[in-house]
Amino acid sequence: MRSRLSFPWLALRSMWLNARFYLPYLLSCALIVALHYDIQFLNMNTGTDLLPGASSVHGLLSVVVLAVDFFSIFLFVYTNSFLMKRRERELGLYSILGMERRHLRKLLRWETLFAGVISIGGGLLLGIGFSQLFVLLFRAVMQTDVALGFEVPKLAILYTAFVYGLMVLMNLVTNLVRVSFVRPIVLFHTTDVGDREPRTRRLVAIVGVMALGLGYSISFFDNPLENLGLFLLAVLLVIVATYCLFSSASIAILKRLRANASYYYQLRHFFPVANTLHRMRRNATGLATICVLSTMALVTASTTFGMYVGAGVGAAWGNTQEGRALVSAYFFVGLFLSILFLMACALIVYYKQVSEGYEDAPCFATMQQVGMSDDEVDLVVHGENSLAFLPPLAMAACHTLAALPITSRILLAFGITNMGLVLSCTALTLLVYGALYLIAFRIASRTYRRIVAWPAADAARRGYRTGRAVER
Amino acid sequence: MALLEVKHVKKVYKPRLVGVGVTALRDVSFSVRRGEFVAIMGESGSGKTTLLNILAALDKPTSGQVLLEGKDLARTRERDLAALRREHLGFVFQDFNLLDSLTVRDNIFLPLVLANVPHDEMERRLTPLVKTLGIERLVDQYPYELSGGQKQRTAVARALITRPSILLADEPTGALDSHAAESLLRTLGRMNARGQTVLMVTHSTNAASRATRVLFLKDGRVRKQIRRGERDSEAFYAAISRSLAATIRPQRGGATHA
């Protein structure tokens, strides 16, 4: 009787105690559920069928739903693995206190159930609330008299709940396997063993450069409306190149920086370069993902922006109601997708900073012990974060510029011939995105700063510096 | 003038909201002269670590004064304290506290990087130091490739490379096997013989027997101190053991502490 009562209670309690990690997880999951529902809602809304060019809109929305699903899988896996890594110590402690594996599994099942109910249920409620707003926005953007009614398509709810239920289940299975196969003592002593210094991988770098060159060059002659396959190949090549370059060239560059003594042995470079290099092998994927997501957001936003403005400026078909509706739909969906990519990107940046903050905290404690002031901590934190987050943004901007020929050819097909306009739309998109990215980066940096270092006296009192409890 | 003067230091930890504070240090006074090797002994809970944190300017005393080269630590601004730590104090910890992402060389350079010392000067200081400590072949390795003893030598090198007025060691042999501990204590003795002032907090009688003076801390007070004088390590060890029995251990039949 007691155990039946206490497991859900224990699960809720441990979620509450881990709110710092659980809250962003639940929030981001709920947000993506809400977005998924809303796009489904639009796709299934009876009003959408009455729109001019309804089939194109449906086709677009179906593609967007697939994209959302794809990123949801990525998000759920990424955030879950982060969450579990932070929880390992606690689970290890439970098992040392006498919980058997089946108890841990039971605890995890309850936690996952609660997390699933909160994120899916909360997300659906949020999505239903948003959908009203969407209807208003969609009608404003489409400039049509066709009414998109406020309705709650059951199928949209069922589909969304099914997709995310599957993802929650997938995470649950992963976590259960994780506790089942790892010995408790390992769970408890999960403090990271030092990564080895990463080796420069020349072959990967060469593959990366070649893929990038090939992908970029396709952009200069392919017309995606005639040859979609080649376009997709270019996208794939650039993605592969990004991952290759972040996992090889970054290491080579950092090693070069480290070899330059007069650069390296300066406070603002010393720890940032060493630490970034040290964890580059693990980080390359995360940074490359940030870069790819940013590129997708930038290309989507700049293209749709160009289309919207161009159509307004005077493409011939921009004057027909159907043409306007279609271009507005594209714009709306493009905007939506960009926001989605940006959100995924901001989330990764945040998670990366939080998890690294906890890893780096002992290092900063040591540096403060040997005489680093609070201002110098700021300097080092800033140096380290710039080193990690500016390259993905720079590379994303580079990809976006390289994609200009191909995107301008798409716009040409829509009758937009004004290259100056396309260029300024792209520039404006870059500026806005850069600003948003830097805001996300600032927020993440501040979180990291809070985690890594307390004021000296405060830290001493907590016994943090000596790595054990202060004698009282 | 004494290098370090501790005058009537009291430290009370107050709970954040309500309740009775915990007194870690009641009234601690002692001084350390240049070139001394002082060991502070005490059981867990005697206030050793609190005292060390106060000496390291990582924590402030509730009342009393700590003077380092005549300068009152409590009156020094936070910003200057960081500079004071890196210029006058060297730290060696029980669990080494090396940075995993830095090589041995860069770990040792860390305080110099903080102090903006030019790179060629860093190298000039490094060479003789690593030779003395027997880690010259390890400078390009990472901490995770080293044994405990080698890690602690690296930590000693990091503490000494700034040529600190005083080396503060917090249970430096606590995580070492007896062989590595012995070797580290010999090294500290050798550094002291060359004029390095050392202040070590320990509960190991063996470690304390290498010092020139031992203070016994109990319940937040210095209960007794003995000097080595002309005794060798073994005789001093025996003297420390006797003093420990007399001061630290509860008296037979005496009142027990609550």
Image (cartoon, coloured by chain):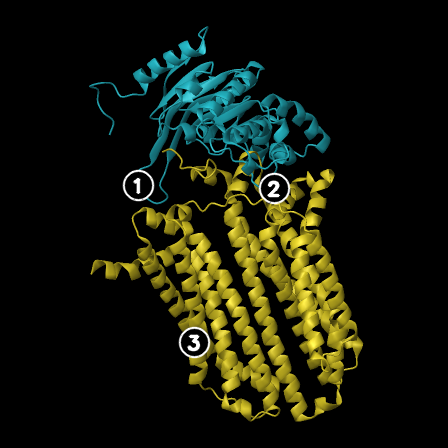
Give A82 or A386, whichever is nearer the viewer.
A82
Asked if the residues shown at circle 1 and circle 3 are in contact, with their CB atoms under 8 angstroms apart, the answer is no
Local crowd size for mark 1, using a 10 Å CA cut-off: few (<14), some (14–19), many (≥20): few
| Mark 3: amino acid | Phe
Task: Name above or below for residue A90 compared with residue B14.
Answer: below
The answer for which chain carries disc 2 is A
| Mark 1: amino acid | Gly
Give B22 or A223, whichever is nearer the viewer.
A223
Task: Name above or below for residue B167 compared with residue A219.
Answer: above
Q: Which residue is mark 1?
A: B19
Name chain B's colour: cyan
Local crowd size for mark 2, using a 10 Å CA cut-off: few (<14), some (14–19), many (≥20): some
**Which tag is nearer the camera, tag 3 or tag 2?**
3
Q: Quadrant of residue A267?
A: top right
Asked if the residues shown at circle 2 and circle 1 are in contact, with their CB atoms under 8 angstroms apart, the answer is no
Please name the residue shown 76% across and 85% down the image: A415
Q: Which residue is mark 2?
A: A376
Spatial CA span between label 3 and label 2? 50 Å
Q: Is disc 1 in the same subunit as disc 3?
A: no
The answer for which chain carries disc 3 is A
